[in-house]
Image (spheres, rainbow, N blue to C red):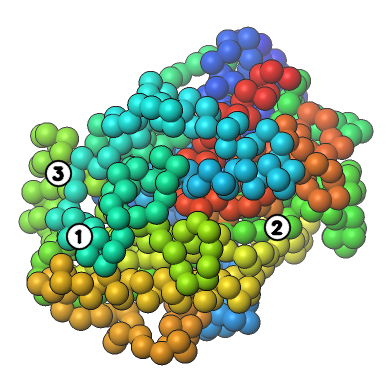
Amino acid sequence: MSDVQINKTKLTYDYIIVGGGSTGSTIAGRLGEKSQNSVLLLEEGPRDKSIYIHIPVTYYKTAQGPLLKRYNYQRSAEQTPQHEATMVQAKVLGGGSSVNAMLYLRGNSSDYDDWEKAGAIGWGYHDVIKYFKKSEDNNIFHNKVHGVNGPLGVSDCAYKHNLSRVWLKACQEYGLPYNPDFNSGEQQGCGFYQVTIRNGRRSSASKAYLSNRRDNLSVETGCKVLKLIFEGNRAVAVEFIQNGKKQTAYAKKEIIISAGTFGSPHLLLLSGLGPKEDLEQYGIPVVKDLPQVGQNYQDHIEMSLVYKLKGAFSYDKYKKLQWQAVAGLQFLLFNAGPATSNIIETGAFWWSSQGKKLPDLQLFFLAGAGIEEGKDGVPGGNGCTISITQTRPESVGYIKLQSADPYQQPLIVPNYITAPNDLKTLADGAKLVQSIMSQDAFKDYVESSHVPEKPLESSEDFENFVRNEAYPGLHPCGTCKIGKDELTSVVDPELKVHGIEGLRVADASIMPNVISGNLNAVTIMIGEKAAELILNS
């Protein structure tokens, strides 16, 4: 390996990246393109070898399987029931891009202008659009907002289920216009989602950016990072355990933390970067008093309405072996058929009654039931699911230490739906879904409502449904936000940790505000911009 010094006591690289998720894989791949750089990427999970990762339709397995790390979180008083709740994050090379639903969404252009207003100078929409385009290899669009020839495969689903088309007809029957491209700058309406799929296979960040083997790039999996090591105010090394052996790797230039919205602040806190009083409480030497580490936690929150169908009109029929065999043959022989679908083929953006300027509701139509984490199928086995999220939630939470032990999870307090507007917006989302599903387009397909058991009617019904059924959207962000100074943020606009040399954070945790859409495309954009900032510094 070029430019890497290895002896019995010291591993030295130019750059060390902690976390091989969407952003970390992107940064590692881009830094590794420069042959003069030696790069080490440390990922806690395994390599992305599972066949279920690469076949799009088996998203329903990766979304509930062993490649996920579970975190406990504290429910708010507005949510019921009050028992212990969990959320998941990916624990595999490629991170969320290896296990998610592959939806390619960038949010609204105003999301990034809001970032800039919040202190993320250089992160406005006019700044970041070039990084979206740089990453993208779109099989449909090539225009001022879409790119081709990038590492990341972006496409329409090659296979579109008939029930997805029925849902789009029902949306238009209700009054939503058809939108051919949710990433064009105009979100409102209904349409097919674009997905990170290339030639019928998932295009994860690890597949896109790490597939080309390079002698100067080392990718190590199964690595639990314990803490950062400092000399004065400079981060110089990373201490980690791999295969039961504690090791230390040194960085000649920089360390980049890309461990995610939970992992990045947790590692900073364990390493002595965070609120002084919290660090002292657990006996952690204070390297830098940074009060905002772990603050500003934001996430979408979702809920699902599930309907029972009159017959085998959804993907649920492929739960039977004979249909799996048919789909498998289509996939193996022709690289086609239902196995190339991500199941969540269609969706919509629309307004609640809360008087917002831009759409504040996002819908996802799943031509099947029992696909999402924790959601069961329907009696008779044939159903469909419509998930709802609020695009701009107002509730904000935080993450704190519970122990100085790196194996002890941090305390996660999301404060979901504590802002009154969040409850009302999601209730409006349920009303919208019921209206769409009652259109004539569905009269030959839907037998009855399953969740809820009968249609909701009163405002109290809708709000209680939100309280009982809402669950994390798994789009956490904001806990190491970009900003101007150390009193109001964790990193500066170049992603450098305030007051610390040789250390950056780059992942969803740096977002000042959650964007109005799924986060994967955004975290890859962050990786592209971060890599350029690092190489230019």
Above or below, comparing residue 198 to residue 467 in the picture: above
Dot 3 or dot 2, earlier in sequence: 2
Tell me the crowding category of disc 1: few under 14, some 14 to 19, or many 20 or more residues within 10 angstroms, Cα based.
Answer: many
The residue at 70%/45% (across/down) is 117
What residue is disc 1 on?
169
Which of the two labelled residues, at mark 2 and mark 1, occupies the earlier sequence position?
1
Locate residue 491, reporting x and y percent.
76, 41
Dividing the picture into quarters, in which one does residue 377 lie? bottom left
Picture coordinates of residue 206, whole percent (x, y): 45, 33
Q: Does 408 sit above or below residue 529?
A: below
Quarter of the image where one finds residue 450: bottom left
Q: Nearer the viewer, residue 337 or 62?
A: 337
Crowding around mark 3 (Cα neighbors within 10 Å: few <14, some 14 to 19, many 20+) is many
What SS does tag 2 mark? loop
Q: Amino acid at mark 1?
A: Lys
Does residue 355 lie above or below 497 as drawn?
below
Quadrant including the N terminus: top right
User: Mark 3 highlights which residue?
Assistant: 337
Camera-nearest label, 2 or 1: 1
> Residue 296, which numbered label?
2
Type of residue at label 2? Answer: Asn
- Is disc 2 surrounded by few (<14), some (14 to 19) or many (20+) residues within 10 Å? many
User: Helix or strand or loop: what does disc 3 sit on?
Assistant: loop
Asked if residue 239 can be seen in this view, the reply is no
Residues at badges 1 and 3 in contact (C-beta under 8 Å)? no
298 left or right, relative to 221 = right
Mark 1 → mark 3, Cα distance in angstroms? 22 Å
